[in-house]
Image: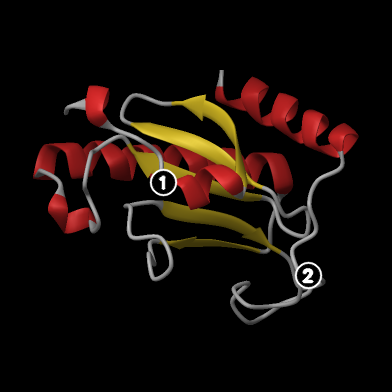
Amino acid sequence: MDAVSFVIDSQLKQTSYPLTSLDVCDLRLVDDQRWPWLLIIPRVPHAVELIDITPDLRAQVWLEIDHVGRVMRDQFSPHKLNIAALGNQVRQLHVHCIARFPEDEAWPNPVWGVGDSVPYDSELLNSRLNALRDAFS
């Protein structure tokens, strides 16, 4: 894996905050407090689809997706976890992990295109980042 030439897409950077790095993926918190929402971004230059990466690396990415899902379940006790790799707006390979609840704004539909995002205020952002960083350490 050539992590030296890996760069996170500018749109992902603009709409999320760095959380931590796992063995092969970077994690970012999406700047929308309506949902606990993480991005899992494999550090693989030019990858668009999961099938673009080697089977061994793909297996490691799946292990990290599993780990992220378990942390999200432990931290937020969601009714359902939505885990998806869409890439329709940002081609760079990334996986969404979103904690969903029956009382959330989009339930039971997908979160995409529902209302306007609600950016984190600094207090909630710091609290959420710190709690998640502790959970991943």
Q: Is residue 122 left or right of residue 83?
A: right
Of the 4 image quadrants, the one containing the N terminus is top left
Question: Which mark is nearer the camera, 1 or 2?
Answer: 1
- Placement of 107 over or under 79, stated as above or below: below
Q: How many marks?
A: 2
Q: Reply above or below: 26 against 97.
A: above
Position in image of residue 15 (x %, y %): 61, 50
Quickly name the residue at label 1. 9
Which mark sits nearer the N-terminus, 1 or 2? 1
**Tag 1 secondary structure:** loop
Hey, what amino acid is under mark 1? Asp
Q: Is residue 49 above or below residue 62?
A: below
> Tag 2, which secondary structure?
loop
| Residue 56 in which image quadrant | top left
Label 1: few (<14), some (14–19) or many (≥20) C-alpha neighbours in 10 Å: some
Q: Position of residue 67 (x, y in %)?
A: 45, 37
Which residue is painted at 33% across and 60% down in the image? 91
Residue at horizontal 24%, vertical 29%?
5
Callout 1 touching callout 2 (CB < 8 Å): no
Image location (x, y in percent) of residue 16: 61, 44
Residue positioned 20% across, 44% down in the render: 58
Q: In the rendering, at what x and y percent does residue 27 appear?
A: 49, 36
Q: Is residue 91 above or below residue 7?
A: below
Comparing 111 with 64, the one in front is 111
- Residue at the spot of label 2: 104
Residue occupying the point 23% across, 39% down: 45
